[in-house]
Amino acid sequence: MKSLWRWLRTGYRLLTPRFLKRWVPTSLFGRSLLIILLPIVLMQAAVAYAFFDAEWRTVTTQLSEALASDVAWNVDLYDADPTPAVLAKITRRAERTQTLTITLQPGRKLPPERANTLIPPLDAALRNALNDKLQEDVWVNTTRYPGLVDIRVAVKGGVLRFLAPRDRAFASRGLVFVLWLSLATLTLAGVAILFIRNQVRAIERLAAAADAFGRGSDARFKPYGAREVRQAGYAFLAMKDRIQRHIDQRTLMLASVSHDLRTPLTRLKLEAALAEPSPRVDAIKRDLDEMGYMIDEFLAFARGEGAEALSPVRLDLLLRQIADGAARAGAMVEVEVSEGLSVQARPNALKRALANLVMNAAAHGTTVVIAGRVLPSGGVDIVVDDNGPGIAPDRYEEAFRPFSRLDEARNQNEKGVGLGLAIARDIARGHGGEVTLDRSPLGGLRAALRLPG
């Protein structure tokens, strides 16, 4: 009872989801193939076992007993009169009526070692039948000669050797049945692989189109495959069109708003320029400049850079260009990047993201270090360090929120509107990358922009 309970408990553990997850394929192709092939293989195995147990073994046992009877009958005849004349008579009759070849090996003994077996259960049936029919010692070999069974019996004066066709001991059609069963399984597996692969390819292309659209690329996709897959494809295309219309409408609206705001803003700047110089006029000019900068920032954040095409970008040249701009703002900037380092990106968008990170570091610190390196995965990692006051780790994510300024954590930037980090992360994610924050070895903030290869 304890062993039964232990067996049931072991079987339950093997069927638990946690155990199965380690062995079940993770891909849709692998799981679909497993769902189709596993029942086929189990069914074929059950059919083969039933045939082997009910038919093949039964027929083989009957054939083995018939062969053992013929061998025993010839051995008894020879033992009754072990003369050359009787042996010759037995040999001729055995070849003519029993398809047996009989030879006498005088002075020989049975081989001491046990012969290799072709199929152990079937060889065991022949050995058992010979042991039941004969009183003498017997040695059997089913693998030495192709198509023949070698049977040796110890008799007076030596060993009587019998060579019989394999068909007389084993049901040869059973092997043909198993072969056809295996071929059928392989054929079904091949057909299943072709059909499943065709369906999975449609889903893979849909996923690739969704990923390309998420990065701002042209997501060309034509639905095909099963009905459900086509429905998902058409739903994706409809969603893509709705999102694109929303982006276009928002961009158009913001461009119109920006244009409408720039017209009175330009008039105000003109009036301020024509006014008599005074501290109040200078303050008005600064406010007007800040308003113009804010309008540009809002429009850039809302518009994004999704319409720009991907092209190779020389990071070493781009980072040095951005560093020169930060140096003119008064910061000490150092660039550590390999010569010729490049990445596939949208040039203007990437320049804006990196400029935001570098100028943000220059605005809050006196020393800025920019480093670029190639990742083992093939991507690129660009790190911007500064020696400013930094940001508390629990407020890193808050710093990425649009219009978040964190004045208590960083020196206040009179010109900023809290969109620099948000725009940088939005551009990085549009490329399939990410922007993260961490504490810098210089004592301030580290901003890392990572792009895939």
Image (cartoon, rainbow, N blue to C red):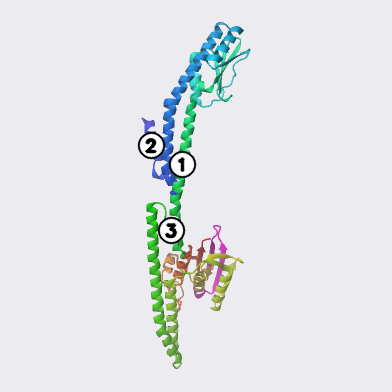
* The one of 209 and 184 positioned closer to us in this rendering: 184
Q: Is residue 236 above or below residue 184?
A: below
Label 1, label 2: how many angstroms apart (C-alpha)? Answer: 33 Å
Of pointers 1 and 2, the one earlier in the residue sequence: 2
Q: Nearer the viewer, mark 2 or mark 3?
A: 3
Residue found at the very far right of the displayed protein: 107
> Answer yes or no: do the residues labelled 1 and 2 have beta carbons within 8 Å?
no
Of pointers 3 and 1, the one earlier in the residue sequence: 1
Q: Is residue 270 above or below residue 423?
A: below
Q: How many marks?
A: 3
Q: Secondary structure at mark 2?
A: helix
Of pointers 2 and 3, the one earlier in the residue sequence: 2
Residue at point 42% right, 36% down?
Answer: 42
Q: Which residues are magenta?
A: 360-383
Q: Mark 3: which amino acid?
A: Lys
Q: Which residue is mark 2?
A: 9
Q: Give coordinates of residue 259: x percent, y percent.
A: 41, 80
Q: Which residue is mark 1?
A: 189
- Residue 366 among magenta residues: yes
* The one of 433 and 13 positioned closer to us in this rendering: 433
Q: Secondary structure at mark 3?
A: loop
Q: Which of the 4 image quarters holds residue 147? A: top right
Q: Mark 1: which amino acid?
A: Ala
* The one of 32 and 197 positioned closer to us in this rendering: 197
Q: Nearer the viewer, mark 1 or mark 2?
A: 1
Q: Give coordinates of residue 200: x percent, y percent.
A: 44, 51
Q: Which of the labelled discs sits on residue 28, or is there none?
A: none
Counting other residues with Cα less than 10 Å from the Cα at mark 3, is it few (<14), some (14-19), or many (20 or more)? Answer: few
Q: Which residue is mark 3?
A: 222
